[in-house]
Image (cartoon, grey):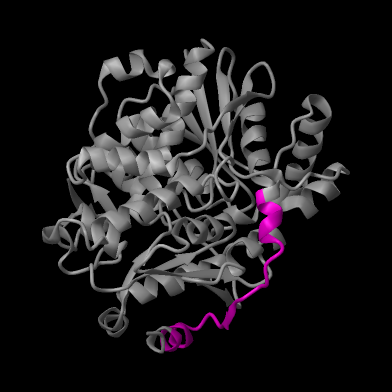
Amino acid sequence: MQYYSTNGKAPIADLQKAVVKGLAEDRGLYMPEKIHQLPKEFFDHIQEMSFRDIAYNVASAFFGEDVDLDALQELVYDTLPFDCPVVKVTDSIYSLELFHGPTLAFKDVGARFMARLLRYFTSSTSDTSRTSDTSSKTINVLVATSGDTGSAVANGFLGVEGIHVYVLYPKGKVSPIQECQFTTLGKNITAIEVDGVFDDCQALVKNAFMDEELNNHMMLTSANSINVARFLPQAFYYFNAYARMKALGKTDQLVMCVPSGNFGNICSALFGHEMGLPVKRFIAANNANDVFYNYLQTGQYNPKASVQTLANAMDVGDPSNFARILNLYSKNGARTPEETHAAITSLISGATYSDEQIKETMRQCYEETGYILDPHGACGYQALVDGLQEGEIGVFCETAHPAKFKEKVDDILGIDVEIPARLAAFMEGEKQSVPMSKDFSDFKSYLLNQA
């Protein structure tokens, strides 16, 4: 499979380059030149398949031309030692619980898959024809996080030989439990506490990729959803959700709702739809950071500074993966902006919620159903409450365990959310972080002083 840049000015890349480099030379995001349709037989029997087997079939369509199929199966199975069930909340709304991985957040799958794929491409025991320029060098993974990405990536790559991870996060703007999941690990994980917001962290990462001196000094890649190996595997979730709903006989008018920040998760769902996933339509649920919602209403994309909210992992004012969505539905620029907007809005609607609305949703859902939403899942749930049409069945992504936001959830619901043992273990470690300004020259100087 060949990959091109959304900006259209970079050389075509193979999968290895797209994964190892992360960002194209022209600052664009890599896109696969074609999206393979999955066969009818796959969907006919999908309800009988395990999450692992579903994921392997989807991964084969994405990566099977570039990764040995036996190795790919092992990679997928190793990525998924857990399941992601669908749970009934109301008669017409179901929760797809994506928080059953090691860090109790949906980003575990993409992070674990990417770590294993990088190891496949850079292992000294692999085919020398594909590792000759990378196997002897340390790969430095830069990742900006507004919450769960940092913990998922840090734990996905923890202890992986030949890879060092730098997690950039906004000071004081992630939950204490989220913070401890990537600041207490040590080993090959370095946490960098940036005096700014998520967009500043993301800008530092992108500027690092474009800096010639830095790239001559060290091998850099990203584990944010700008990397094809991070966002594409998240499509596994949506095929699994369809399978579980098909087993319940509830797929005739299926609507998927995705709480959205940097838009990697919903972007993977849209790629799944292009592969034949029979979902009727999608809803992108935003918090007060409503740039994409406004685009849906007006056709104009106007990024702006992010604002801090209860649903902090979605606090993104310029979502990177909007470029992929635009490219996908413009048919790589073949459609006019008006035609592209019409194609997007025919499949995707939006919703946006304030902190007060999020709180009220969490209270109402808990009082009426007993289901505990985290602030991000609350956006998805409420978007279905507000947006489902007659006869439709909705599935929303509950993207993280509510205990990851324990202080907020306890305060809003007046309860004491139990902290799972694996989450509590992170809280026993000692915080290790490097303070950093949002000035790129400071970040560059720091990296140049690293081995």
Q: Is residue 9 above or below residue 419?
A: below
Q: Is residue 161 rendered to the left or right of residue 249? A: left
Q: Is residue 189 rendered to the left or right of residue 182? A: left
> Which residues are drawn in magenta?
422-446
**38 falls in the magenta region:** no
Q: Is residue 441 above or below residue 301?
A: below
Whether residue 323 is visible: no
- Looking at the image, the residue that sits furthest to the front is 125
Q: Residue at x 63, y 18 (%)?
A: 92
Percent from the top left, x then y, of residue 347? 42, 30
Quadrant occupied by the N terminus: top left
Quadrant of the rendered structure where residue 65 is?
Answer: top left
**Viewer-closest of 311 and 346:** 311
Q: Is residue 1 above or below residue 48?
A: below
- Looking at the image, the residue that sits furthest to the left is 129
Q: Is residue 167 above or below residue 363?
A: below
Percent from the top left, x then y, of residue 157? 44, 60
Whether residue 209 is visible: yes
**Viewer-closest of 293 and 443:** 443
Q: Is residue 153 rendered to the left or right of residue 419? A: left
Percent from the top left, x then y, of residue 317? 53, 59
Q: Residue at x 67, y 67 (%)?
A: 429
